[in-house]
Image: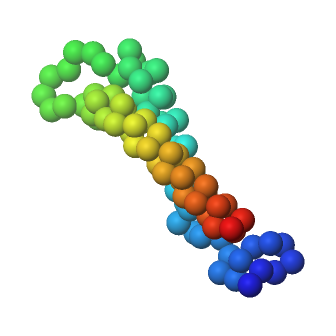
Amino acid sequence: MENSTGVGRFGINPFIVVLWPMAAVLIGGGLAALLNANLALGPSSGEMPLAFMVFTLAPHAILGGIIAVIGLLLWHATQWQRRRG
């Protein structure tokens, strides 16, 4: 059952709405951490600095964001196919 805007009875899935910005933040934050790596790394004594931890996890954040975007595109494709069929 659709209303005049074409959105289904249950409306927009809030999880999908949250996943798009989260994927963008993961990719953007990971790239920002990698681009600012020369400022983050340097000699230190004692415990491991937070900047080094962020730099270490940046490639994994980028990969997670890319995987989320691919998964979201696949989800949208299946929803589009279901509506057309």
Q: 18 or 3: which is nearer to us?
A: 3
Relative image position of residue 62 (x, y in whole percent): 43, 35
* Residue 52 picture quarter: top left
Q: From the top left corner, tell me how far across and down residue 27 is, in percent.
A: 49, 37
Toward the front, the furthest residue is 85
Q: Does residue 80 lie above or below 38 as drawn?
A: below
- Figure quadrant of the N terminus: bottom right
Query: Measured along the vertical axis of the image, is residue 18 above or below residue 51?
Result: below
Q: Is residue 44 above or below residue 15?
A: above
- Drawn side of residue 77 relative to residue 59, left or right: right
Give the residue displayed 38% in from the left and 15% down from the top. Answer: 38
Asked which quadrant contains residue 6, the reply is bottom right
Residue 29 rendering spot, x and y as whole percentages: 47, 36
Q: Is residue 30 above or below residue 39?
A: below
On the question of residue 54 being in view, the answer is no
Q: Residue at x 58, y 69 (%)?
A: 14
Question: Going 62% across and 64% down the picture, which residue do you hit?
Answer: 79
Depth check, front residue: 71 or 14:
71
- Can you see residue 16? yes
Expressed as whole percent of the image width and height from the top left, the position of residue 81 reads 65, 61
Viewed as shown, does residue 41 lie left or right of 30?
left
Horizontally, is 60 left or right of 16 in the view?
left
The structure residue drawn at horizontal position 54% and vertical position 52%, both measured from the top left corner, is: 74
